[in-house]
Image (tube, rainbow, N blue to C red):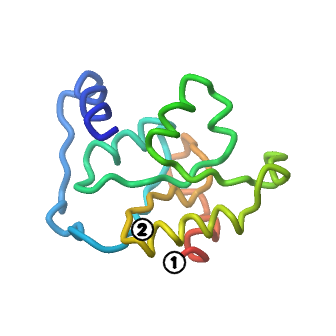
Amino acid sequence: MQWLSRRVLGVLYNEIRVLGAENFPAEGPVIVIANHGNSLVDGGLLLATLPRAPRFLAASTVWDYRPVAPFMNLAGAVRVHRRQDGRAHEGSLAESFAEAVALLASGGVLAVFPEGRTHDDPGLLPFKTGTARIA
């Protein structure tokens, strides 16, 4: 997925600069927190630029977009079944958080957009509490 993200973003952008990549841990658990202003581009940027491939927490509704669903599966995204989406019957937050905790316990990288949704507001939205509960 990293290779694909790099190729697609290479077509969309002339230059992507990453500052501080040398500070990213080479091993061990990592939680990456990012704002979510550009829908799917945000995840692609993280996949393309992080030294280690992250898995994402993502609302289960993202899988409703059929062209996107295979990429979410390839990236190993963790489905979050949110009550406000009417998806609580498909799984629980506890199950989603347990999967995220297991990923971290195995030394993986978890990427989270703690605002809980994409938006075009100029600033950050209030953060949801899930990231803190997982940490």
Q: Are marks 2 and 1 in contact (CB under 8 Å)?
A: yes
Relative horizontal placement of residue 18, taking residue 33 as reference (left or right): left
Label disc, if present, on residue 135 of the rendered structure? 1
Q: Which amino acid, by three-letter code, is at mark 2?
A: Ile
Q: Earlier in the sequence, mark 2 or mark 1?
A: 2
Residue 44 in the image: x percent, y percent?
A: 38, 39
Q: Residue visible at 25% across and 47% down?
A: 49
SS at mark 1?
loop
Q: Which amino acid, by three-letter code, is at mark 1?
A: Ala
Q: Mark 2 — residue? A: 31
Relative horizontal placement of residue 86, taking residue 110 as reference (left or right): right
Mark 2 Cα within 10 Å, few/some/many (few <14, many 20+)? some
Relative horizontal placement of residue 48, taking residue 55 as reference (left or right): left
Relative horizontal placement of residue 125, taking residue 17 as reference (left or right): right
The answer to which quarter of the image holds residue 119 is: top right
Which residue is at the far left? 22
Where does the N terminus fall, quadrant-wise? top left
SS at mark 2?
strand
Residues at marks 2 and 1, CA–CA distance in whole angstroms: 8 Å
Q: Residue visible at 29% across and 40% down?
A: 2
Residue 96 in the image: x percent, y percent?
A: 65, 61
